[in-house]
Amino acid sequence: MKKVLTVEGMMCAHCQARVQKALAGVDGVVEVMVDLGTKQAAVTLAKDVPDGALADVVTSAGYTVTSIAEA
């Protein structure tokens, strides 16, 4: 299963790395690809992970999730 998060507040490669690291630390996430240009983070999941859990770690890292969609 894949989900795509739209993340606001990323301005540079450091921001991109923070979001990637935060999402990679969520149980069930097996791969994370963050695109600074589109402000999107694509996550590949090994099991069902609630949208709230993904949004919470991004928020804790200092960014805002504006949408989450299944890909």
Image (tube, rainbow, N blue to C red):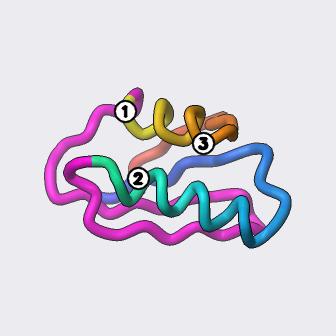
The answer to whether residue 12 is above or below residue 19 is: below
Find the distance from the CA under tag 1 to the CA under tag 3.
13 Å
Q: Which one is nearer the viewer's eye here, 68 or 19?
A: 19
The answer to whether residue 8 is above or below residue 59 is: below
| Contact, mark 2 vs mark 1 (Cβ under 8 Å) | no
The residue indicated by pointer 2 is: 3
The nearer-to-camera label among 2 and 3 is: 3
What element does badge 3 sit on? loop
The residue indicated by pointer 1 is: 53
Residue 57 on the magenta span: no
Choose top left, top right, bottom left or bottom right for residue 44.
Answer: bottom left
The residue indicated by pointer 3 is: 61
Which residue lies most toward the right here? 11
What element does badge 2 sit on? strand
The nearer-to-camera label among 1 and 3 is: 3
Residue visible at 74% across and 72% down?
13
For label 1, the crowd category at 10 Å Cα-Cα, with few meaning under 14, some 14 to 19 and many 20 or more, is few
Q: Which mark is residue 29?
A: none
- Left or right: 43 in relation to 59: left
Find the distance from the CA under tag 2 to the CA under tag 3.
19 Å
User: The N terminus appears in which quarter of the rendering?
Assistant: bottom left
What element does badge 1 sit on? helix
